[in-house]
């Protein structure tokens, strides 16, 4: 049995929850002989309940290890508090000699390591070294992990992936350009920078609307939009279900991802799948998915003027929007479809303890050219 250990399980609202939901749903449909269960280490509801959910998860994993049911742990880790929680689980697995595949989703992990003291650094290095394989989201993260943790046994690049529609939705050419933001309303997502950019002279007088979809500190950004005089052009939807997100992706023209930190955001990949033009910040592995001037436009994080200039380009030039959108869809089909992800994930599982009885129900897709690995 493979135990997939992740905060929030498949219900978590952020990108980590979406990728876990995507690949577990795909495994159920296309590799039914792979036996797995998802363990939620965070739980729903308020933060004060988290320690109780985590303790229950540790008890369940301890019982699985003691009984011999746990043949492999696939542990998903973010940054800061997540590192402590997942470190405890890696230590537990090490005690029972259960192999661990550690999957890093930590946009702020470099910042955490830079701020950490010597003892914390050594503890985190032990966690990394105790895992049989470390999975990262792109070449940027492979270089960081290789340089920071020379004791890592094996590092494999596995970009996030999403399911997509069979074809790109038709979008009317008339009317305002429909901009879309998908993500949590928290400072590191750069929503304030986006609103400042749209209020600048480069964008204010152009024909656009913006939908901001996500939960978090909505009141702060609604007040900023009011103060900037954008209220009649900006809609806040709150948290959306995956189906509702797909509805907005089908009707938008441009996805804007102004984050200050990211791993490889699911919203960008979902926009590529739906054939949207993309304006994003050059953070994490975003530049590996979005080629500047090819499948999108990239700017430096936190630079409202640069973001405004790129938005001005896509607002003014319908042909540019169409070209960026077409290339984004092509790159999705080549590299970020969930079917290719399934094949590579099963390869990782097999070399780290996938039970012999488990076989994929369909042939493995050809290995994407962008995926690499470092072996000892």
Image: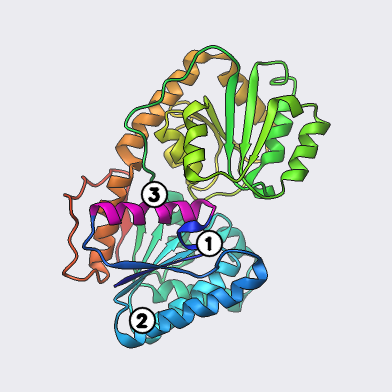
Quarter of the picture holding the C terminus? bottom left
Q: Is residue 19 magenta?
A: yes
Q: Is residue 273 magenta?
A: no
Mark 1: which secondary structure? loop
Which residue appears at 58% of the width and 77% of the height?
Answer: 52
Q: Is residue 157 visible?
A: no
Measured as percent of width and height from the top left, residue 3 is found at: 36, 70
Which residue appears at 36% of the width and 81% of the height?
Answer: 64
CA separation, marks 1 and 2? 24 Å
What's the mark number on residue 64? Answer: 2
Q: Which residue is mark 3?
A: 159
- Residue segment shown in magenta: 13-30
Label 1 CA crowd tier, 10 Å (few <14, some 14–19, many 20+): some
Measured as percent of width and height from the top left, residue 252 is found at: 52, 27
Observer-nearest residue: 304 or 354?
354
Q: Is residue 48 visible?
A: yes
CA separation, marks 3 and 1? 15 Å
In the rendered view, would you say 190 is above or below 64? Answer: above
**Along the polypeptide, which appears first: circle 3 or circle 1?**
1
Mark 2: which secondary structure? helix
Foreground mark, 3 or 2, reads 2
Check if mark 1's residue and mark 2's residue have beta carbons within 8 Å: no
**Along the polypeptide, which appears first: circle 1 or circle 2?**
2
Measured as percent of width and height from the top left, residue 259 is found at: 61, 43
In the displayed structure image, the side of residue 58 where residue 30 appears, left or right: left
Q: Which residue is mark 1?
A: 78
Q: Main secondary structure of the magenta part?
A: helix
The image quadrant of residue 107 is: bottom right
In the rendered view, would you say 355 is above or below 250? Answer: below
């Amino acid at each position: 049995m493979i135990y997939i250990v992740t905060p929030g399980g498949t219900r978590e609202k952020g990108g980590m929850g979406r990728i876990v939901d995507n690949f577990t749903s795909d495994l159920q449909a296309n590799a039914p002989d792979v036996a797995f269960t998802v363990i939620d280490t965070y739980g729903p509801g308020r933060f004060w309940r988290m320690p109780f959910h985590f303790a229950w998860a540790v008890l369940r994993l301890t019982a699985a290890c003691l009984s011999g049911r746990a043949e492999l742990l696939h542990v998903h880790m973010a940054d800061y508090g997540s590192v402590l929680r997942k470190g405890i689980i890696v230590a537990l697995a090490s005690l029972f000699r259960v192999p661990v595949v550690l999957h890093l989703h930590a946009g702020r992990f470099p910042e955490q390591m830079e701020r950490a003291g010597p003892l914390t650094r050594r503890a985190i290095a032990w966690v990394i070294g105790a895992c049989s394989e470390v999975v990262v989201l792109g070449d940027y993260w492979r270089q960081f992990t290789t340089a920071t943790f020379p004791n890592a046994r094996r590092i494999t690049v596995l970009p996030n992936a999403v399911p997509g529609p069979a074809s790109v939705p038709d979008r009317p050419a008339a009317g305002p350009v429909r901009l879309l933001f998908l993500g949590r309303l928290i400072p590191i997502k750069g929503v304030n920078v986006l609103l400042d950019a749209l209020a600048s002279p480069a964008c204010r007088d152009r024909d656009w609307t913006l939908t901001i979809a996500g939960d978090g500190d909505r009141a702060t950004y609604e007040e900023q939009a009011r103060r900037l005089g954008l209220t009649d052009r900006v809609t806040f939807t709150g948290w959306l279900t995956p189906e509702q997100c797909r509805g907005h992706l089908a009707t938008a023209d441009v996805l804007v991802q102004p984050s200050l930190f990211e791993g490889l955001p699911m919203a960008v990949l979902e926009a590529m799948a739906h054939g949207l033009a993309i304006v994003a910040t050059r953070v994490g592995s975003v530049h590996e998915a979005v080629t500047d001037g090819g499948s999108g436009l990239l700017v430096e994080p936190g630079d409202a003027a640069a973001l405004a200039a790129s938005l001005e380009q896509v607002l003014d030039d319908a042909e540019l929007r169409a070209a960026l959108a077409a290339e984004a869809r092509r790159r999705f089909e080549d590299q970020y479809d969930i079917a290719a992800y399934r094949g590579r994930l099963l390869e990782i599982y097999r070399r780290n303890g996938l039970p012999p009885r488990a076989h994929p129900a369909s042939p493995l897709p050809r290995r994407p050219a962008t995926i690499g690995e470092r072996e000892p």
